Image (cartoon, rainbow, N blue to C red):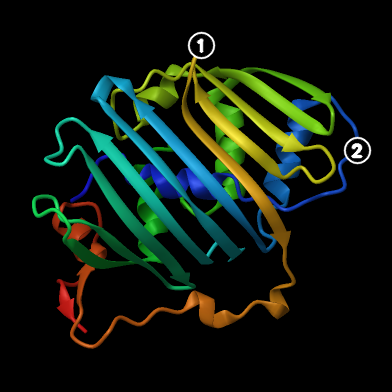
Amino acid sequence: MHHRFAPIFPALFLLVGSFPLFAQETNDVAVWVEKMAECTSQPVSYDFSLKFDMEGMGMSVASSGSILMQDKRHLRMTSQTTVKAAQMPTGEQNMKQEMIMDGATMWTVTTMDHPVNRGEKITSISRMTIELMEKVGAQATGLPGVSNSTDMASQIRTMFEQFYTDCELSISNGLVKISGNISEEFMDSLPMGGLELSRFKAELDEKTAFPLQIAMGTDKKDFIKMSMSNPKFLDPKKIDQDLFRYTPDPGASVMDMDAMLQSMGKAEEGSSESEL
């Protein structure tokens, strides 16, 4: 079972992966934005929680998990997600997901409730070349101007240069708070409807510039909210590289997203679903 909002998840998860810099006190929004952008190539791990409230679609999403990022092509994410919607047969859908990027391929393993048979689980495996992600990143993430959905520095700069306006900044009690308006152009770019997003806010650790919270919504309510905690900044030489490797079990069915996108006219290369 696939939902139109699913492609935005990686973008939001990856958008917030930042490495600490020894921040000098400044009230210049551009300086703090650049601190986040410049540091995203450094290895980091952290826990996250993400909440969507899509009132216009009668749907809510709650997800939590952890991310280990060595660089934009080597990443491992595990998450547990609950989707609630009145139109679902059981009223909600629970899923566990693991995403592994090995430098060339993004593997995604999803285990979810059976859409009809209560108590049963179904598991799907998909793969997509990172090269293809770089070609169709803007369509997949809903972020125009971001050609690579794993290039966090590009994402951060694009959001603040093109889609976040009238930004305000304050610093107190060790937190850097940035808020502002969200452009209509950004809303038009999203691959889903049912969201009213006019304001954004972010909280960064003053000492490290690590983002602790990012939210989008209105003055009255946050419709998308992501919180990050327990950041650990890593020596790449000490990271177990096996964490970025994945091999499906013999005979497992794997959905080839390159081939699927090719059939949809979004890519030029690909191959059909295969048995490994």
For label 1, the SS is: loop
- Amino acid, disc 1: Lys
Question: Pointer 2: residues within 10 angstroms few (<14), some, or many (20+)?
Answer: few
What numbered label is drawn on residue 22?
A: none
In the image, residue 218 sits, relative to residue 273, either above or below, namely above
Q: Residue furthest right?
A: 24
Quadrant of the frame with the C terminus? bottom left
**192 and 215: which is toward the camera:** 215
- Return the x and y of residue 160 as percentages of the image width and height: 61, 30
Q: Which residue is drawn at the image coordinates 81% and 26% (left, top)?
A: 28
Q: Residue at x 52, y 65 (%)?
A: 75
The residue carrying pointer 1 sits among few (fewer than 14), some (14 to 19) or many (20 or more) residues within 10 Å by Cα, namely few
Place residue 114 in its image quadrant: bottom left
Residue tagged 1: 220
Q: Amino acid at mark 2?
A: Gln
Query: How far is the residue under mark 1 from the one under mark 2?
Result: 32 Å
User: Residue 24, which numbered label?
Assistant: 2
Please give left or right for residue 52 compared with residue 242 in the image.
Answer: left
Q: Which element carries disc 2, helix, strand or loop?
A: loop
Q: Position of residue 183 (x, y in %)?
A: 48, 19
Residue occupying image coordinates x 71% and y 79%: 238
| Apparent side of residue 32 relative to residue 274 in the rendered image (left or right) | right
Judging depth in this view, the residue of 245 and 116 nearest the camera is 116
Whether residue 146 is visible to the viewer of this picture, yes or no, is: no
In primary-sequence order, the first of circles 1 and 2 is 2
